[in-house]
Amino acid sequence: MAHDRHLQFYIPTGKGPLVIPDRGLTQPADVTLYDEILIEAKGYDGPVPAKHKSTVVHGLYERETLAEINGRESISVREYIAGGFVVTHTMRLPTAEELAKFRVKQGTFGLKPGKRRANRGGKQRHLQLVTRSTLRLAVDTYDLMLQSVDGVKLINGDTPTIGQCIELVDPLIKRLVVNVAMGLD
């Protein structure tokens, strides 16, 4: 079990392992983001400590998601966010062609010929592992299939339009929703 937890943070790349940093390493960026998005903070005598700001920013991305197919028309992905908030993304079901295309593009790594290196038997070509991000694919898929987002309001209290949702939903959340909708998570 401990080995499995370690593997969650080990992502092979062409230049060695990529280790996801702990929260302490991202604290300066978290503090900057917190300061930019803060509307109001209550309950503090003085400034909010940097560690608390970092915890709040990380909490924005901690959520549980569940998918539910609504007949033959759509799929709803519900995000259960800390604090009791529920956001529902309703997306149309993908066509068989769209699903096949998505799954082909979803492959996240490949091999390509690397540099020739001398060894005992002469020169040998080594293979290089090449990774690619699936973020752009997920964002494009989300934007294409989105029908509605329920459970959110704009700062002025209005319900956002589809165009506003496409513009304002964080790309990482889009990827999470698409992966759940496509059965990848």
Image (tube, grey):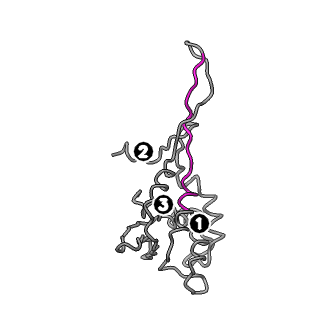
Q: Are marks 3 and 2 in contact (CB under 8 Å)?
A: no
Q: Nearer the viewer, mark 1 or mark 3?
A: 3
Instruction: Nearest to the eye among marks 1 and 2: give it.
Output: 2
> How far apart are the alpha carbons under marks 1 and 3?
47 Å
Camera-near label (3 vs 2) is 3
Number of the label disc, if any, that sits on residue 6 = 2
Report x, y in % for residue 75: 41, 71
- Label 1 to label 2: alpha-carbon separation: 30 Å
Question: Which span is picked out in magenta?
Answer: 123-139
* Residue 127 is covered by the magenta coloring: yes
Q: Position of residue 59 (x, y in %)?
A: 50, 66
Residue ID at (60%, 82%): 155
Q: Which residue is mark 3?
A: 98
**The one of 167 and 28 positioned closer to us in this rendering:** 167
Residue at 36% across / 45% down in the picture?
2
Q: Earlier in the sequence, mark 3 or mark 2?
A: 2
